[in-house]
Amino acid sequence: ITTGTPKLDAVLYHRGWGRRELTSIMGGAKAGKTTALIHFARMASFHGFNVLYATLEVGANIISDRMDASVASVVMKELGAKAASVAEVVKKAGEKAGKLILHEYPSGTFSPNQLRQLVQRYKTPGRNPDGSLRPPIKFDLIVVDYADIMAPNYRTNDAIENSKSVYVDLRAIAFEENAAVLTATQTNREGFKSTVAKAEHVAEDFNKVRTVDLMISINKTEEEAARGESRLYFAASRN
């Protein structure tokens, strides 16, 4: 499932995101994790793949605005003034794209089992909000923004065990659905200050590194950020 960037696809084992695999984008606060997830979701859709995007932190309306601005190459603050032209560009882009469906949930309430139920709901024919029939949808890419603030299926008093449970279940969902699952995770303080965030800089629970098939960190100095640049580092890879 393409990342939308040929040079990135070329260095990945599956020439894109692998089905039945869990990938995590790692970065410090405001490093661009959500921006990356939005981009990868949009590009997969543009290439004909069906995408489910579950946001647990940023509001769905903001995610939608960011996607629309990106598709139409318009800065966010101009969306209102250019609403008609943006809508036209988005509609035209959607004619050839796969499905991209967005859901939002409060932080700390959405569990892997709820994700399973959501995926199953779309695999069953139903009705759209306007009453029209909705054909079944099989998702190729499932994006969770982001796993660190999911709820485990069965909560314990051990935060690390809860975190491990979430990541193991997300990887299981990727296998069950023959889909790629893409999420994000925070760095710890040391990683936030580092020029390159590596596997040992993952926040709170190293089991995340053991569980994911691929972990890519987003890195940028203040000078790079000022130039609109960042670096991707392969922190962990099963293949």
Image (cartoon, grey):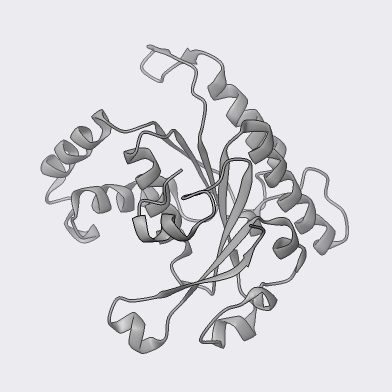
Q: Is residue 235 above or below residue 237?
A: below
Residue 159 x/y as whole percent: 81, 62
Observer-nearest of 201 and 157: 201
Q: Nearer the viewer, residue 214 or 39?
A: 214
* Number of marks drawn: 0
What residue is at 69 percent from the left and 77 percent from the top?
200
Q: Is residue 163 left or right of residue 220?
A: right
Q: Residue furthest right?
A: 157
Left or right: 224, with 122 as reference point: left
Name the foreground residue: 212 vs 121: 212
- State the residue at coordinates (65%, 59%): 148
Q: At 17% across and 44% down in the image, what residue appears? A: 86
Q: Residue 66: image x %, image y %?
A: 32, 53
Q: Is residue 103 above or below residue 210?
A: above
Residue shown at 81% from the left, 63% from the top: 160
Quadrant of the image for the C terminus? Answer: bottom right
| Residue 47 on image: x %, y % | 34, 39
**Left or right of residue 75, residue 109 in this image:** right
The answer to whether residue 46 is left or right of residue 157 is: left
Tell me residue 91's x, y (percent). Answer: 21, 33
